[in-house]
Image: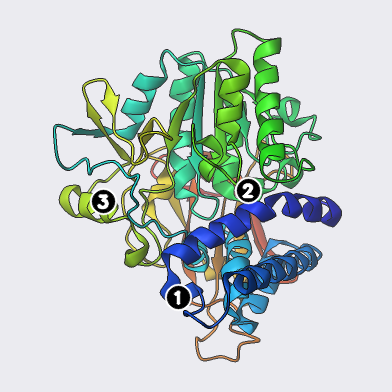
């Protein structure tokens, strides 16, 4: 992606960035906002906007570095060097995106997480009454059968919220859904459907392996993948309306179309104020007359700190210990935390924390873990190991990535830019098949390159 395009896109994201930061600040005052009397709300807002400008510049400079690992290290170094509260709050989200790009999902959660406190418009807990627990995939598929559009939301810094969408694509395709649209795909990648796989120039979030897997899966299943987002539309109503118009245009061209959409946070809420105006989903329904099934996936998830979890989430996990995403139903009704805004809420399981990356990356059995070790790095740490499908070009987005680092935690900050890591072992999660494995250092130099065939049991063989 060219730096100028990246900067333009970041400007369109600024409103969402600040909005998310303000939500987090409101819910987490002890850690992110100034104490009473320290400064006025206007002064705090001004500091946030300054931090957003600073963050945008750092990210543009980071993109000039060679390779994803160097870009991430550049971002991490600047985050470690500036402890001003507004900067940490805003830039933490920017950093988290790059952490997801290199497969460091736990690090991303630690850098940025929108707290989910109990709120007055919450529904009653589904642990009372006659609600029954079912696999979320089954509930969504049942509710989607008579719909022309299904909208999933995601938390960009928490790719676990992309997993259920990926797992459901095949079943939705079998039900007749034939278009797939995702936030921040670039409209000028005209060759995406013909090429059959995503590249880093296909979109902004596309460099995150699960996002790439979502688009790759849709293409392989025969969905027509479309870019609906408008990079230069601005923020608020302008962006929401432009996106909705592009989705509506699909149905004007093909009245029999059935559409699956992936979008961030409240872009898919059905009612209520969003960034001072209306959401994309609300505009879409008004334009098209189509009532989309809106699946909320960002609120009932595990956060970096337990005190950021919604009280219902804590109670549900403690009571039921779900091993897969779940939903609650009562007859034909599905439970949602926000009854006026979404059709149902998905509750994601908690994950054990370890150095070998979370098991939810198996995508409910679609992928298998493949161990990788520091031998691929040949003594150069940190290093980034990635796997690309052998059937795709060298420009393809990786199917998965993992970073290895063995720098001592008490090393100088110039060396210890990767905090919380110290293992020379990790796991890639891959579908059975053939891959190109590479390990690159911070200078984007290839330390090791080899082909491997992954079997269904996770064992790999090399030619």
Q: Is residue 86 left or right of residue 25?
A: right
Q: Position of residue 154 (x, y in %)?
A: 50, 44
Residue 135 drawn above or below residue 275: above
Using a 10 Å C-alpha cutoff, classify the residue at mark 3 as few (fewer than 14 neighbours), some (14 to 19) or many (20 or more): some
Disc 1 to disc 3: CB gap under 8 Å? no
Disc 2 to disc 1: CB gap under 8 Å? no
Q: Which is nearer the N-term, disc 3 or disc 2?
A: 3
Q: Disc 3 and disc 2: Cα gap in Å?
A: 36 Å
Q: Position of residue 145 (x, y in %)?
A: 41, 15
Numbered disc total: 3
Callout 3: SS: helix
Give the labeled residue for mark 2: 398
Q: Which residue is drawn at 62% across and 64% down?
A: 384
Q: Which is nearer the N-term, disc 1 or disc 3?
A: 1
Give the labeled residue for mark 3: 312
Callout 1: SS: helix
Residue 382 drawn above or below residue 325: below
| Name of the residue lying farthest toward the left | 129
Q: Give the number of the disc on residue 31.
A: 1
Q: Which residue is drawn at 59% across and 82% down?
A: 83
Q: Disc 1 and disc 3: Cα gap in Å?
A: 22 Å
Q: Is residue 56 left or right of residue 266?
A: right
């Amino acid at each position: 992606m060219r730096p100028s395009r990246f900067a333009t896109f970041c400007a369109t994201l600024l409103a969402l960035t600040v909005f998310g930061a303000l939500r987090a600040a409101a819910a987490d005052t002890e850690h992110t906002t100034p104490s009473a009397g320290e400064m006025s709300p206007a002064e705090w807002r001004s500091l946030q906007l300054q931090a957003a400008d600073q963050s945008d510049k750092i990210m543009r400079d980071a993109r000039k570095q060679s390779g994803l690992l160097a870009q991430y290290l550049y971002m991490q170094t600047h985050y470690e060097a500036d402890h001003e509260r507004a900067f940490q709050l805003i830039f933490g989200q920017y950093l988290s995106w790059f952490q997801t790009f290199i497969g460091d999902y736990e690090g991303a959660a630690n850098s940025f997480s929108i707290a989910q406190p109990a709120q007055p418009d919450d529904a009653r807990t589904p642990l009372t009454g006659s609600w029954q627990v079912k696999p979320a995939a089954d509930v969504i598929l049942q509710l989607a059968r008579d719909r022309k559009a299904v909208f999933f939301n995601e938390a960009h810094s928490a790719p676990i919220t992309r997993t259920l969408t990926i797992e459901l694509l095949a079943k939705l395709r079998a039900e007749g859904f034939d278009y797939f649209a995702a936030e921040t795909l670039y409209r000028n990648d005209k060759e995406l459907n013909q090429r059959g796989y995503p590249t880093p120039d296909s979109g902004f979030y596309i460099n995150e392996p699960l996002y790439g897997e979502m688009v790759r899966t849709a293409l392989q299943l025969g969905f027509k993948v479309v870019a609906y987002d408008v990079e230069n539309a601005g923020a608020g109503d302008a962006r929401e309306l432009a996106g909705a118009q592009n989705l509506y245009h699909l149905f004007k061209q093909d009245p029999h179309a059935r559409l699956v959409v992936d979008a961030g946070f409240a872009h898919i809420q059905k009612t209520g104020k969003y960034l001072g105006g209306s959401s994309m989903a609300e505009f879409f329904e008004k334009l098209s007359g189509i009532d989309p099934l809106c699946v909320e996936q960002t609120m009932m998830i595990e956060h970096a700190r337990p005190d950021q979890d919604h009280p219902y989430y804590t109670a549900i996990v403690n009571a039921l210990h779900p091993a897969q995403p779940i939903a609650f139903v009562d007859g034909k009704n599905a439970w949602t935390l926000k009854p006026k805004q979404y059709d149902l809420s998905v509750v994601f399981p908690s994950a054990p924390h370890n150095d070998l990356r979370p098991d939810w990356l198996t995508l409910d059995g679609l992928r298998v873990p493949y161990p990788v070790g520091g031998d691929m790095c040949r003594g150069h740490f940190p290093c980034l190991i990635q796997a690309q499908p052998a059937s795709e070009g060298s420009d393809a987005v990786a199917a998965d990535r993992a970073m290895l680092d063995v720098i001592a935690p008490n090393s100088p900050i110039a060396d210890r830019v990767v905090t919380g890591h110290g293992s020379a072992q990790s796991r890639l999660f891959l579908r059975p098949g053939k891959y190109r494995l590479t390990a690159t250092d911070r200078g984007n130099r290839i330390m090791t390159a080899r082909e491997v065939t992954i079997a269904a049991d996770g064992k790999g063989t090399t030619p």
